[in-house]
Image (tube, rainbow, N blue to C red):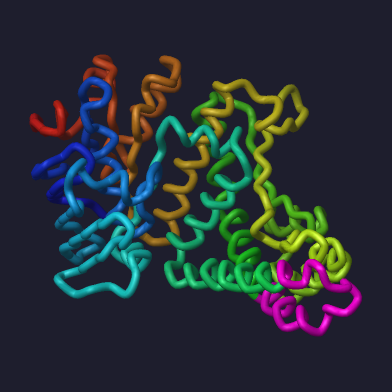
């Protein structure tokens, strides 16, 4: 899949700009704060998952009421046109071939992107929220219809938390009947979300391990699902593919944990257990010992791990969709040593359409891009 032509109107610092992109490697160069990342951000929005770094209000050029993104795209042998209208406070309206889509997440059926930028280091060293979001977005990219699983869980949690707050002052022993219906809903929707995550993590793991070994020049990376309600042995055996995913079994484990925490939940007025609190553990080998990358790895190893995860995501999506997603790499070169720069330059030449930004002059020589775009103050000059 690829973006052939992109038109931006009042998007970030772009007033009215149009550019054609090459099907292979596109290098976007320019000094900092000129609009390089904004270009990647607009392409990421075409995938229906919004901006990877800001809310809608930040995407509209100062003083304007809306931002518009138009694109001619190709997926397999289909040529399609996407129109986005982004309005602060009103969300995003999307058209595909001039026909409205029910929600922007449906655009994942048309375009899939993989974004890696400086902030993606939080995938390894940041809070569990970022890793959950990474896994949930991967689930949707693999099967767009599964976006409904996450939305259903969010709805159940809102309703259940509202009920728990209203019962906070009540006698905990007398609220079982009122919570029972939402307990069942939480077990059902929570197990469905967890099963989808476990499946995605299981399929991602071998790609991540392979990519880490390549980019790090050795060592190994292991991913595992961390949950307070799933037995560690079960989560581990599912993650490594030695056990099947049984949604009914997941429901039973979640129900048992809810029962044990019932009094505490009523006292706190909040749901204390479920996939909304789960995490992904990233461990790296060091002299034969597996260590938690978040706590013990150097920043260089953490960055290498995060890059390996994103490239593994691209590998898995390419394999599953039988088409290569668009790879968006923001200012990656400045954070890599010469060996890893050379490895990345080789890696991105054969992964379909890639748009890579850099403020590094050496990137021009190292990457040998098919097209070079130079950005100055929201204007794009093209060469190559």
Q: Nearer the viewer, residue 344 or 30?
A: 30
**Magenta stretch encompasses residue 168:** yes
**Magenta stretch encompasses residue 264:** no
Q: Position of residue 316 (x, y in %)?
A: 47, 52
Q: Which residue is drawn at 68% across and 53% down?
A: 278
Q: Residue at x 72, y 80 (%)?
A: 184
Q: Main secondary structure of the magenta part?
A: helix
Q: In which quarter of the image is the N terminus?
A: bottom left
Horizontally, residue 99 falls left or right of residue 228, namely left
Q: Which of 38 and 193 is in front in this view?
A: 38
Q: Which of 211 and 83 is in front in this view?
A: 83
Image quarter for residue 305?
top right
Image quarter for residue 362?
top left
Q: Position of residue 113 (x, y in %)?
A: 35, 50
Q: In which quarter of the image is the C terminus?
A: top left
Kindly give the residue lying farthest to the right in the view shown.
173
In the depicted structure, whether residue 193 falls above or below residue 181: above
Q: Which residue is drawn at 66% across and 31% down?
A: 293
Q: Where is residue 195 in the image (x, y as percent from the top left)?
A: 64, 66
Q: Which residue is drawn at 44% across and 20% down?
A: 336
Magenta-drawn segment: 164-188
Q: Position of residue 136 (x, y in %)?
A: 53, 57
Horizontally, residue 28 falls left or right of residue 155, namely left
């Amino acid at each position: 899949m690829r973006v052939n032509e992109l038109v931006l109107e009042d998007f970030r610092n772009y007033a009215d700009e149009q550019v054609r992109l090459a099907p292979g490697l596109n290098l976007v160069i320019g000094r900092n704060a000129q609009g390089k990342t904004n270009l990647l951000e607009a392409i990421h929005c075409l995938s229906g998952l919004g901006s990877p770094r800001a809310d809608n209000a930040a995407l509209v050029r100062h003083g304007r009421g809306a931002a518009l993104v138009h694109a001619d795209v190709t997926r397999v042998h289909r040529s399609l046109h996407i129109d986005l209208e982004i309005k602060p406070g009103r969300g995003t309206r999307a058209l595909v071939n001039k026909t409205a889509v029910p929600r922007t997440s449906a655009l994942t059926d048309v375009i899939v992107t993989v974004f890696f930028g400086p902030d993606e280091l939080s995938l390894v060293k940041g809070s569990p929220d970022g890793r959950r979001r990474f896994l949930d977005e991967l689930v949707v990219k693999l099967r767009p219809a599964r976006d409904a699983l996450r939305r259903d869980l969010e709805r159940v949690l809102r309703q259940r938390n509202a009920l728990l707050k209203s019962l906070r002052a009540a006698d905990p022993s007398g609220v079982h009947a009122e919570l029972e219906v939402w307990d069942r809903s939480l077990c059902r929707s929570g197990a469905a979300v967890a099963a989808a995550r476990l499946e995605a993590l299981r399929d991602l793991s071998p790609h991540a391990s392979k990519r880490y070994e390549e980019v790090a020049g050795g060592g190994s990376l292991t991913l595992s699902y961390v949950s307070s309600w799933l037995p560690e042995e079960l989560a581990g055996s599912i993650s490594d593919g030695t056990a099947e995913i049984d949604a009914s079994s997941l429901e039973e484990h979640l129900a048992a944990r809810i029962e044990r925490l019932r009094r505490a939940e009523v006292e706190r007025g909040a749901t204390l257990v479920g996939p909304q609190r789960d995490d992904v553990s990233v461990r790296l080998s060091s002299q034969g010992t597996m260590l938690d990358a978040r706590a013990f790895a150097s920043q260089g190893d953490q960055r290498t791990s995060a890059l390996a995860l994103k490239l593994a995501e691209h590998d898995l999506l390419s394999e599953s969709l039988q088409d290569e997603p668009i790879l968006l790499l923001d200012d990656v070169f400045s954070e890599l040593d010469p060996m890893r720069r050379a490895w990345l330059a080789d890696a991105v030449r054969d992964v379909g359409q890639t748009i890579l930004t850099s403020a590094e002059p050496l990137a021009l020589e190292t990457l040998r891009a098919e097209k070079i775009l130079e950005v100055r103050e929201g204007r794009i000059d093209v060469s190559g």
